[in-house]
Image (cartoon, rainbow, N blue to C red):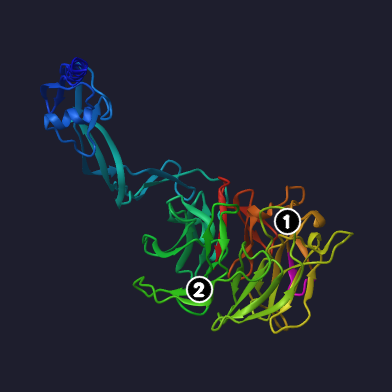
C-alpha cells in the first residue's frame, strides 16, 4: 500500500511539472520614418505591438494590418501618420463679356457701356497629408467677397424700322435687359444690361423717374431692384425676395411700392403663395423706410396656394385684388376686403390657376376685369369656358358687361382720360379670343372700344396675319396722351397709332417679354 502511494505521488509530481513556453516571434514596426524590431509573444494583436513599441496613434492615423489583427512571425506593422489642416485661398472670379445690340447706333459702332471687373471669392480647403505627403485637398467652404461686374459692349446693328415719335417714357425687357425709349423710337438706351431680368415684375414709376424690376437670384426665386431712369446709375436692391404676382408703385406717394410674396417650394409651380400685401418706401438717398403690412399672410379662399393679384387705384387709396373666385378692393390704410364680384373658379385640370386680370378705370369709378361666366353647354360651372369682359362699379352694384365671351386672357387696359365734345371719357383696349369657347389655347387680336363696350373694333394684327399669343403679348400699354398703344407681337415691340390705324415694329430680335409706358 505504501508502494502504491509512492507511485501515485510520483505521477502527480510529474503532472505538475512546468509547461514548455513557445518561443517569441519577430515583428517589425515602421512609424515616423523609423523601423523598430521587436520580439513578442505569439497571439499578440497589432494594438498590443504598438503599445509595447511605445507608439501612440493620432485620431486620423491609419495602421496596417488593422489594430485587431493577430500578428504573425516576420510581419511588418506600418503606421501612416494622417494630419488634417485648413488653408484659405482668395481666388479671382473672371468677369463675363456681354454684347448688347442697339439699333439706334450706326452699324459696327461699339461703345463700352460698363467696364468689367473681376470678382473675388475666398475658398477654405481641408488638406490631408499622409506621412507628410499631401493626398487630398477638398473645398470646404466658399465665401463670395465681391461679385464680378460684367463688361457690357453696345454694338450698333442695322435697322430697317422707321422712327416713330413717342410721348413719355416707354420701357421694355429685351433678352433679359431693360431698355428705355424717349421722344422717339430711335432714342433708346439700356437701363439694366445684366441679362437676368426674369419678367415677373416690371413697372415704371408714375413720374417716369424709377424702374422697378425683378431679377434672378441664386438662393431665392427672385429679388426686387430699382434703377433710376436718369443719370446712368447702377440698380440698387430693395432686399425683397420671392415676388411672383404683384409689385407696383403707388400713384400717390413718392418712391413707395406695394408688393406680395410667396414661399419657394420644391413641388410645382415652385411656390406657395403667402397672399400678403406690404408697402415700403425709400428716400432720395435710397434708404428704405419701415415696412407696413396691409394684409398679413393667409390661406383664405380657394386655390390660395397660387396667389393673389393686386392693382393700385388711380388716387392710391385702394388696391384692387383678384382671386380665382373673387374680385374686389381693399383700403390702402386698413386692409379690409370689399368683394365686388364672385364666380366659380375655373378648373384648369393642370398645375396652374386662372386669375382674372384687373385694371382700374382712369377715374377710379370702375374695376375692369374678366368674369367667369355661366356654362355654354352641359359642363359644370367650374368647367365653363365662357369669360366676359365686365366693369364693376367700385362703390358696389350690378356688373356691366362690356364684351361677351372675350376670353380668359382678355387683359383689359383702360386708356387715359381724354376730353371729348361733351364729357371726359376713355377707351378700353383688350384682347379678344378668335375661338371664344377655347380661349385657353386660342389666338387673340387687340380690340379698342368705348368705355361702355360700344364701338368695339379690332386694330391689331392686320387682317391675314397670325393672331396674338396672350402669354407672350401680355397687357397692352397706352401712351400718356392716349393716342398710341404698345404691345408685344411675336416677341417684338410694336406701336399702333390709333388715329391712322398704322402699326410699326420697333425691335427685331424676338426677345421682348414685358413693357410699360408712362
Along the viewing direction, whichever of 279 and 46 lies nearer the viewer:
46
Which numbered disc flags the more N-terminal residue, 1 or 2? 2
Q: Is residue 16 above or below residue 187?
A: above
The residue sitting at 67% across, 76% down in the picture is 328
- 315 w.r.t. 372: above or below: below
Q: Report the span colored magenta.
A: 448-454
The quarter holding residue 25 reads top left
Q: Which residue is mark 2?
A: 278
Are there few (<14), some (14-19), or many (20+) residues within 10 Å of tag 1?
A: few
Residue 148 location in percent, x, y?
A: 33, 48
Residue nearer the viewer, 223 or 459: 223
Q: Secondary structure at mark 2?
A: strand
Percent x, y of residue 282? 40, 74
| Residue 1 pos. (x, y %) | 22, 17
Per the image, the residue denoted by label 1 is 348
Q: Say which quarter of the image contains residue 156.
A: top left
Element at badge 1?
loop
How many marks can you see?
2
Q: Quadrant of the C terminus?
A: bottom right
Q: Is residue 149 left or right of residue 328?
A: left
Q: Is residue 250 magenta?
A: no
Amino acid at each position: 500500500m505504501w508502494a502504491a502511494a509512492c507511485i501515485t505521488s510520483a505521477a502527480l509530481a510529474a503532472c505538475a511539472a512546468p509547461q514548455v513556453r513557445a518561443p517569441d516571434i519577430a515583428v517589425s514596426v515602421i512609424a515616423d520614418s523609423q523601423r523598430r524590431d521587436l520580439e513578442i509573444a505569439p497571439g499578440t494583436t497589432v494594438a498590443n505591438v504598438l503599445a509595447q513599441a511605445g507608439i501612440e496613434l493620432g485620431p486620423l492615423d491609419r495602421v496596417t494590418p488593422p489594430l485587431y489583427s493577430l500578428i504573425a512571425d516576420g510581419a511588418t506593422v506600418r503606421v501612416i501618420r494622417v494630419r488634417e489642416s485648413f488653408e484659405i485661398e482668395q481666388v479671382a472670379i473672371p468677369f463675363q463679356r456681354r454684347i448688347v445690340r442697339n439699333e439706334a447706333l450706326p452699324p459696327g459702332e461699339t461703345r463700352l457701356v460698363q467696364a468689367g471687373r473681376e470678382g473675388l471669392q475666398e475658398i477654405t480647403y481641408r488638406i490631408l497629408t499622409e506621412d507628410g505627403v499631401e493626398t487630398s485637398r477638398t473645398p470646404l467652404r466658399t465665401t463670395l467677397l465681391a461679385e464680378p461686374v460684367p463688361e457690357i459692349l453696345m454694338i450698333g446693328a442695322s435697322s430697317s424700322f422707321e422712327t416713330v415719335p413717342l410721348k413719355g417714357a416707354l420701357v421694355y425687357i429685351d433678352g433679359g435687359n431693360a431698355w428705355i425709349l424717349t421722344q422717339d423710337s430711335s432714342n433708346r438706351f439700356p437701363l439694366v444690361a445684366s441679362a437676368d431680368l426674369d419678367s415677373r415684375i416690371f413697372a415704371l414709376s408714375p413720374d417716369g423717374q424709377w424702374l422697378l424690376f425683378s431679377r434672378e437670384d441664386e438662393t431665392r426665386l427672385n429679388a426686387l431692384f430699382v434703377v433710376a431712369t436718369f443719370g446712368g446709375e447702377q440698380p440698387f436692391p430693395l432686399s425683397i425676395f420671392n415676388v411672383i404676382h404683384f409689385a407696383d408703385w403707388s400713384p400717390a406717394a413718392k418712391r413707395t411700392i406695394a408688393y406680395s410674396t410667396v414661399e419657394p417650394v420644391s413641388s410645382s409651380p415652385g411656390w406657395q403663395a403667402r397672399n400678403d400685401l406690404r408697402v415700403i418706401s425709400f428716400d432720395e438717398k435710397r434708404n428704405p423706410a419701415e415696412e407696413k403690412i396691409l394684409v398679413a399672410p393667409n390661406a383664405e379662399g380657394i386655390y390660395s396656394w397660387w396667389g393673389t393679384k393686386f392693382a393700385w387705384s388711380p388716387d392710391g387709396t385702394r388696391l384692387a385684388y383678384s382671386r380665382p373666385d373673387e374680385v374686389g378692393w381693399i383700403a390702402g390704410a386698413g386692409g379690409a376686403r370689399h368683394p365686388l364680384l364672385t364666380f366659380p373658379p375655373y378648373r384648369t385640370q393642370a398645375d396652374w390657376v386662372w386669375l382674372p386680370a384687373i385694371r382700374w378705370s382712369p377715374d377710379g369709378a370702375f374695376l375692369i376685369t374678366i368674369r367667369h361666366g355661366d356654362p355654354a353647354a352641359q359642363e359644370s360651372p367650374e368647367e365653363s369656358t365662357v369669360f366676359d369682359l365686365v366693369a364693376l362699379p367700385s362703390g358696389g352694384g350690378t356688373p356691366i358687361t362690356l364684351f361677351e365671351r372675350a376670353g380668359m386672357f382678355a387683359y383689359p387696359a383702360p386708356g387715359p382720360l381724354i376730353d371729348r365734345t361733351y364729357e371726359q371719357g376713355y377707351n378700353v383696349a383688350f384682347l379678344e379670343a378668335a375661338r371664344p369657347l377655347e380661349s385657353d389655347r386660342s389666338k387673340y387680336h387687340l380690340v379698342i372700344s368705348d368705355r361702355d363696350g360700344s364701338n368695339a373694333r379690332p386694330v391689331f394684327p392686320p387682317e391675314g396675319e397670325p393672331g396674338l399669343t396672350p402669354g407672350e403679348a401680355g397687357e397692352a400699354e397706352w401712351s400718356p396722351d392716349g393716342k398710341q398703344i404698345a404691345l408685344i407681337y411675336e416677341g417684338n415691340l410694336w406701336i399702333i397709332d390709333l388715329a391712322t390705324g398704322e402699326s410699326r415694329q420697333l425691335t427685331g430680335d424676338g426677345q421682348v417679354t414685358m413693357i410699360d409706358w408712362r
